[in-house]
Amino acid sequence: MMELYPWQKQAFERFIQLEQSERLPHALLLSGPPGSGKTEFAEYLTHYLMCQDSTKRPCFTCQHCSLVQSHAHPDYRRVGIEVDQKTKKEKKDISIAQIRELKSFAGLSQSGASYKVILITPADALNQSSSNSLLKLLEEPQGKTILLLVTHQVERLVATIRSRCQKFELPLPDHEVSIDWLTKNHQLDDAASWLKMSQGGPIAALAMAESYADSGLDYEQIISDCLGLMFNRGSRVIETAKSWKNYPLNLLLEWQLGLTRDLIRQTNGVAIGYFENQDRYDVLQKVSDRINLHKVTVLYEYLIKLKMRADVPLRPETFREELAHQWKHGQ
């Protein structure tokens, strides 16, 4: 069953009030940071609007809910970035042809549901032509058709589209709420670290943790490798870098940033409660008298700069070797 996240309940109550007072706008713009659950919220609203038995929550069991879930409901359309059939890669934007099809769909009569729903995600993928076509649809509302536009880059939407939508901002939950949800609802170990790696987005944190759960990635080994490079003259850069070949680059970098932050905390005598790797505190204590604060701080600053270059098309091997080299020689 689809979940309404705890931090979205207030926004959903606001939506219900609009719908039940017959003040529901023709178009809603759902915006917020990545990982906040915007698309899931839009899907929840879609079920609510089209559910046969809905009072204050969708049932997820009626025929309408089942058809929406399988993307087969005749009164529901979802539009996103398509895959090019020739290259098998995602296209760069939402095409004008996709929006023109929506205009035809909006002109049709309803097929049993209370509303017709169009979900566009990510709406910031609209190009100039498709934006102009969508604008015409927004300017000429068709009956009980509701448009839900989802984006985490609202500034990329043309101003005329933004002005014709009622805005629903869906911010990230407080850190404590995210930790509570990840640990109690999903029994996620090391939730704080996963949350940090996903820039505070609990949905993204959960997805990242699940995708790596069965991949054999070993954080303990990374800590051992990094400390070995830093303190053991026998550790070799190239061999260590090769041993990291199965680790996603962003994960390697975030783990190592967290380790350097804790090394800095260790040298400054910070209490264990503030450590990101509290369960590895004993390991860090063993090397505390060998840590050079200045060198570790320089290393941390370098890793931050490397993170800013993460989208630069470095060869993965080169990226990993840079990381290993800095732990060995760049401190």
Image (cartoon, rainbow, N blue to C red):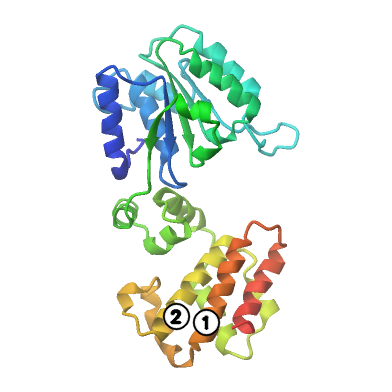
Identify the image quadrant of residue 127: top right
For marks 1 and 2, the one nearer the N-term is 2
Q: Residue 86, position in %: x, y?
A: 75, 33
* Secondary element at image label 2: helix
Q: Quadrant of the N terminus?
A: top left
Q: Which one is nearer the viewer's eye here, 135 or 180?
A: 135
Instruction: Indicate whether 197 appears above or below 303.
Output: above
206 lies left or right of 53:
right
Structural crowding at the residue carrying mark 1, measured as other residues with C-alpha within 10 Å and reported as few (<14), some (14–19) or many (≥20): many
Please name the residue that numbered disc 1 is placed on: 296
The extreme bottom residue here reads: 289
Give the camera-side residue of 135 and 200.
135
The foreground one among 330 and 224 is 330
In the rendered view, does 83 fall on the left or right side of 68? right
In x, y percent, where is residue 10? 27, 38
User: Mark 1 is on which residue type?
Assistant: Val
Placement of the C terminus among the 4 image quadrants: bottom right
Which residue lies at the image location 42% right of the left edge and 39% below the top edge? 38
| Residue indicated by mark 2 | 264
The CA distance from mark 1 to mark 2 is: 7 Å
Packing grade of label 2 (10 A; few <14, some 14-19, many >=20) is: many
Q: Residue at x 59, y 31 (%)?
A: 126
Q: Image check: 15 left or right of 135?
A: left
Q: Residue 40: percent from the left, percent from the top?
A: 41, 37
Q: Determine the secondary structure under disc 1.
A: helix
Pointers 1 and 2 in contact (CB under 8 A)? yes
The residue drawn where x is 39% and y is 13% is 144
Q: Is residue 255 above or below residue 198?
A: below
